[in-house]
Image (cartoon, rainbow, N blue to C red):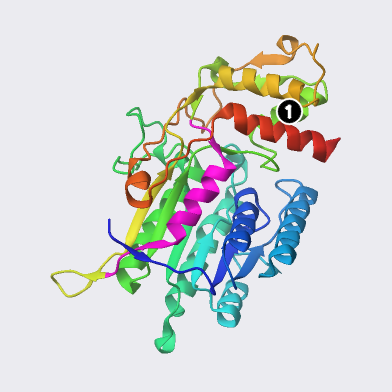
Amino acid sequence: MTKDKIELNGKTILITGAAGFIGSNLAMRVLKDFNDVTVVGFDCITDYNPVELKEWRLKQVEKTAEETGNKWIFIKADLSDSKAVFDVFAEYKPSVVVNLAAQAGVRYSIDHPDTYINSNLIGFYNILEACRHSYDGGELGVEHLVYASSSSVYGGNKKVPFSTDDKVDNPVSLYAATKKSNELLAHAYSKLYNIPSTGLRFFTVYGPAGRTDMFYFSATNNLRAGKNIKIFNFGNCKRDFTYIDDIVEGVLRVMQGAPEKALGEDGLPVPPYAVYNIGGGAPENLLDYITVLQEELIRAGVLPADYDFESHKELVPMQPGDVPVTYADSEALERDYGFRPAIGIREGLGKFAEWYKEYYG
C-alpha cells in the first residue's frame, strides 16, 4: 500500500492514554527522536491499574522532555468527554493523533461492560469527530490518525498465523467487539471525510512498568507474596508475546507513513485506511514463558534461588473470553514499513525483572 510520508519534526502530536504502558513509552520515544516537537498527553488516569505506577510513568516522560528540550503537555481528562477532546484539538491543532486510550482487559469486560462502551466506543467516536472537524475552515488538520486495536479481534480463529485479511466477525469478548468496532468506525470516517487512519492490532504487549493485570506482572506479584499463580487452560496456551520496544518502534514507523489519499472512479475518496498486526510471529508456549520468567526473576534477585515454584502453580480451565492461541502474521507491516518485532522473551522478561527489582526493591 502506498504511503504519504509524514514529517514529525516540528509537529504537535497528540497521544491519548499517555499515562499508560504503551502511551508513556511512545511519548518518550517521540521526545527523544525528533526535534522541535510538542507532545500532548491525554489521560483520565483510572484506577484499573495502580495510579502510582501511572504517575511514575508520567514522571519519566517529564524527565525526557526536560532532557531533550522538547515540549510535553499533559491533560487529565476523560476521552468520553467530547468538550475536553474538542478543546484539545482547538488549542493544540495536532498533526498526528495516536489513540491508545481504552479500557483494556478481556476478563474485566465481562463484569464491567459500561466502562468499555464509554471509553472504547464513545471515546473513540469523539476522537473521530475531532479529527473530522480539524479540517474545518480549510485547515490542514490531522495528517494521520493511528489507533490501537487488538489481537483479541481474531477471537477463536483457528487459522494461524492471524492475518488482517482474515474474517473477524465473531468476537468472544466485549473488549474484542469494541476494538473491531473501532476499526469499522475508522473505516467509515476515512471514507466519508478522507481521514488517513491506521489501526494496529497489538499482540500481548509486555515489559518494564507494564500493565499489572497482564500475566507476567500479576504472576510476579503473586509469587513474591507467596501466593499461587493460576495457569489457564492447564497451560495449553500459546501467545505471541511482543516486547514494548518492538511495539513502540512499530507505532513510530506507522505514524510516519499514512495511507495515501486518492479518488476512485466515482470521483469520491478511496478510504485512506489500513490495519496491521504488530506481533513477533513466534508464539511461545505459556509454560515455557513461565519457566523463563522464573529464571529471570531469580537472576534479577526478585526471588531467591531456592524458591519452590512448583508448589505455587495451579493449573485451571480456560476463562471466558480467552483464546488458546494468538499468532501474528506481520508480513504486511514488514512490507510497508520495513519492520518486524524481533525481541525474544529471554531479553524482554530479563529487562522486566531488572526493572521490577529496582522499582519495588
| Nearer to us in this view, 199 or 324 | 199
**Which stretch is magenta?**
240-261
Residue 99 image point, x, y percent: 53, 60
| Nearer to us in this view, 144 or 268 | 144
Q: Residue at x 42, y 32 (%)?
A: 281
Q: Residues within 10 Å of mark 1 (few under 14, many from 20)?
A: many
Residue type, mark 1 in image: Thr
Quarter-wise, where is residue 262 in the image? bottom left
Lateral position of residue 268 relative to residue 231, left or right: left
Count of labels in the image = 1
Residue 168 image point, x, y percent: 35, 42
Q: Residue at x 63, y 52 (%)?
A: 25
Residue 251 against residue 153 in the figure, above or below: below
Residue 230 against residue 42 in the figure, above or below: above
Quarter-wise, where is residue 258 in the image? bottom left
Residue 257 falls inside the magenta stretch: yes
The N terminus lies in which quarter of the figure? bottom left
Q: Which residue is mark 1?
A: 220
Lateral position of residue 299 relative to residue 336, left or right: right
Q: Residue at x 77, y 55 (%)?
A: 55
Q: Secondary structure at mark 1?
A: helix
| Nearer to us in this view, 94 or 214 | 94
Residue 206 image point, x, y percent: 61, 38
Residue 115 against residue 12 in the figure, above or below: above
Residue 64 falls inside the magenta stretch: no
